[in-house]
Amino acid sequence: MKNNLVFEGVRDGFPIGLGYFTVAFSLGIIAKNAGLTPLQGFVASILNKASAGEFALYNAIQAQVSYLEVAVISLVVNARYLLMSCALSQRFNPKTAFVHRLGVAFGLTDEIFGIMIARKGDIEPLYNYAAVFVAALLWSSGTACGIIAGTFLPANIVSALSVALYGMFLAIIIPPAKKNRTIMICVIASFASSYLFKILPLVSNLSSGNKTIILTIVISSLAAIFKPIETNRESNSSDSSEKCEISANSSTNGEKNA
């Protein structure tokens, strides 16, 4: 039984990890520009397994913001995992030890959440650990390889590779924005607000970290107040997670472009 769970976890986690590697490679270029070594990038990716979170983190490091700002940015940008964790908490066997619940929460990502919620029955921590181990290893390796590549590749190639991450953000933002007018308004508001925060006297002197925090909280809150999602509980968790991620991605991406 245990061997089957490990095999299934590795089987399901490997294709996720392959996708992670390519995205993390682009993040590695950003991390290199922020001054991280391959080892530091590897550890950072192990501890923060979220593309939007890491993107905001490396930009914050490059801008030399305070530790408190880095912590708040990571909390706000990754807030969608609160919703995912609440959804998963209903699927645990009541006898599951608290340490296993923490372990599953630590490895939670959008894709890992997807494969876990799709499985029937109670959540099996061993399956989760196997899937996360493979996916996280490839994710962190991709970041380290990106940093190494950024060290040796010519500057024009590094600059071109840096654009790949923006392509990933566009791939996240555009499809749901086409289907949902509220999301489209949030995306447009995020880009426009980021630009205004760059030029307006009262807020232009704020650090990029504080701008990201303010815009993410304000835009997400306004969307939740004026356009709440009226579906069943499961759809609420999924759609709210998507809105939170898109708003965070748009704010950080818009601030960087500005």
Image: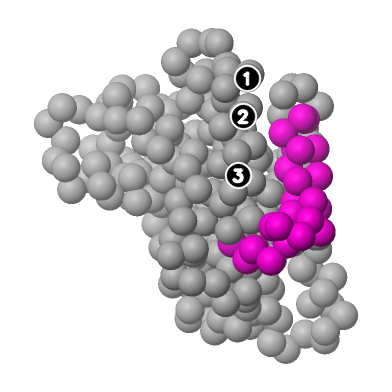
Say above or below: 251 vs 152: above
- Circle 2: is it few (<14), some (14-19), or many (20+) Cα within 10 Å? few
Q: Earlier in the sequence, mark 3 or mark 2?
A: 3
Which residue is denoted by mark 2 in the rendering? 222
In the shown orientation, is residue 83 left or right of residue 38?
A: left
Q: Which residue is drawn at 14% across and 40% down?
A: 97
What mark, if any, has residue 216 been given in the picture?
3
Q: Does the magenta stretch include residue 140?
A: no
Q: Quadrant of residue 183?
A: top right
Residue behind mark 1: 226
Q: Position of residue 209 (x, y in %)?
A: 59, 61
Q: Are marks 3 and 2 in contact (CB under 8 Å)?
A: no
Q: In which quarter of the image is residue 150?
A: bottom right
Count every numbered label the image shows and give the total: 3
Amino acid type of the residue tagged 3 in the rendering: Thr
Judged left or right of residue 102, residue 159 is right
Mark 3, Cα crowd under 10 Å, few <14 / some 14-19 / many 20+, is many
Mark 2 lies on a secondary structure that is helix
Of 2 and 166, nearer the camera is 166
Quadrant for the C terminus in the image: bottom right
Q: Report how far apart the C-alphas of labels 3 and 1 lie in the structure.
A: 16 Å
Q: Is the magenta stretch mostly helix, strand or loop?
A: helix
Q: Where is residue 11 drawn, in percent x and y?
A: 46, 45
Q: Range of the magenta residues?
A: 184-209
Q: Is residue 136 above or below residue 218?
A: below
Query: Which residue is at 77% across, 30% downward?
Result: 184
Q: Can residue 206 be seen in this view?
A: yes
Residue 6 seen in this snapshot: no
Q: Does the magenta stretch include residue 199?
A: yes
Res. 159 mark = none
